[in-house]
Amino acid sequence: MTNEKRALLVEGPVGRILVKLTIPMIFGIVGIVAFNLVDAFFVGQLGTNELAALSFTFPVVLVIASLAHGLGIGASAVISRAIGEGNHHKVQRLTTDSLILAILIVVFFVTIGLLTIDPIFRLLGATPEIVSLIKQYMRIWYFGMIFVVVPMVGNNGIRATGDTKTPSIIMLTAATMNSILDPLLIFGIGPFPRLGLAGAAIATVIARSITLVVALYVLIHREKMISFKRCELAAIFNSWKKILYIGLPAAGARIIIPLTTGVITVILAKYGPAVVAGYGVSSRIEFFAITVVSALSTVITPFVGQNWGAGKHERVFSCIKYSNQFSLGWGATMYLILALAARPIASVFSNNPLVTSTIMLYLWVVPIGFGLQGVFLISTSAMNALNKPLHAAILSVIQMFALYIPLSFVGSYIFGIPGVFGALALAYCAGGIVSRLVLNRIFIRI
C-alpha cells in the first residue's frame, strides 16, 4: 500500500478538502447525537423519574466515551502523521496496538463500574428511587462497553487515512438500529417484552455491536491496517507510549466535560428531578446544534497531522483560518434558530412544565457561546495533531474547572438556574478566545 494512495489530505484546495471531510462526519455525529436524543425521547414517555434516571447516567456514560474518544484522538494523531511520512509498517503497528490498549481499558472499567453504581450515583444526587432505575440501565450498559470503546478507536484509525465516509456510515447504521429497537424493547411492542430502561440499554448494546464488527472488517480487510504478526512487548509499549502521550491528555480534556456535567447535575439536583431531566435533554440538544462544528473539529486532527507530517505548514494555517470563520458564523445561526424555536423544541421531549421551562431557558442562554466554543474545539484538535496535547488539556481544565464550575455555584446562589446556564455561555466565550491565542503562540514557536 503506497504513500500516494494513503496520504490523501496533502494536496488540493484546503477549503474543498475540509468540506469533503466534514460533510460525512456531520452525518456520523448526527447519528451519535440521534442515538442519545432517541433514547431521551422514548424514555421520556415512561415518566419524569425515568428521564431523570437517564440524565443521571449521562455524566458517567460520557466519562467512558471520553476515555475512548481521547484514546482515539491519540491514535488518529500518530497514525495520520505516520501516513504523512509514508511509513505503512508504523501505521499498522500503531493501529493494532491502539485496539489492544482499548480492550484492556474496557476490562478495567467494566469491573470498576459494576462495583460502584450505588455510590457514584448517590454522590451525583440521585434518590434511592432514581438509583434503582439507574441500575436497570447501567448494569446492561457496562457489559456492552466493549462495543462502545473499541469501535471509537477503530473509527479514528479509519479517519486518519482521510476517509470520513466509512465511520459515518457505521455510526448512522447503529443509530438507525437503535431507533428501531428502542420502542420495541422499551414499551414491549409486538412479541417483545416491556423492559423500560433496561430495554433502552439492550437496544444500545445491540446497535453498538454493529459498529465493532464493521470497523474491524474495514481495518483488517480493506485498509490492511491491522497486523497479526508477533511483536515484541517493547514495540507494543513504544506504540502505547506514543498513543497515550496524546491520548491521555486528550481523554483527560474530554473527561472534564462529563465530570463538569456531574457537578452541574449536583447543583441542579436541589431544584428537583424535573430540572435535572430538562438539563439532560438540553445537553443532548446542544450536541445536536453544534454537530457541524464538532464534525469539522474532528477532521482537523487527520488534516493537520498528515500535512504537518508532510511538512506542508501553510496548508495547516489556512485550515485553521477557514475553520474558525465558519464556526463563528454557524454559532450565530444556531443561536437565532434555538432562541426562536425553544418552546416547540422543549415540548417535544416532555409535557412537564418545569422540564420544558428548563429546556427553554437553556436554549435562550447557552447558545450565545456556541461560535467561540467551536473555535475552542478546532484549536485544541489542532494542538493534539501538533503533538501539544498538554496545552489542549490545560485549556479544558481552565475553561471548566476555573471558570464554569465556580461561576455556576455563584450564579446558582445569586440568580438560580439562569445563573448556572449563563456561567456556561461565559465559559464557552472565554475558552474560544484564549485557545486561539495559545494556538497562535504554538505556531510561532514550532
Image: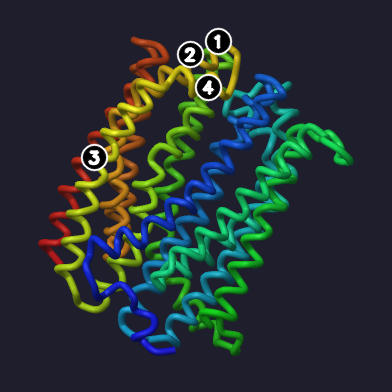
Q: Are marks 2 and 4 in contact (CB under 8 Å)?
A: yes
Which numbered circle lies on residue 329?
Answer: 3
Local crowd size for mark 4, using a 10 Å CA cut-off: few (<14), some (14–19), many (≥20): many
228 vs 338, nearest the viewer: 338
Vertical arrangement, residue 209 with respect to residue 154, above or below: above
Which numbered circle lies on residue 357?
Answer: 2
Q: Upstream in the sequence, badge 3 or badge 2?
A: 3
* C-alpha distance separating marks 3 and 1: 33 Å
Q: How many marks?
A: 4
Q: Quadrant of residue 349?
A: top right
Q: Are marks 1 and 2 in contact (CB under 8 Å)?
A: yes
Local crowd size for mark 1, using a 10 Å CA cut-off: few (<14), some (14–19), many (≥20): few
Q: Upstream in the sequence, badge 2 or badge 4?
A: 4
Which numbered circle lies on residue 353?
Answer: 1
Give the side of residue 18 with respect to residue 294, left or right: left
Name the residue at 62% across, 53% down: 174
Q: Which residue is mark 4?
A: 278
Give the side of residue 229 with respect to residue 333, left or right: right
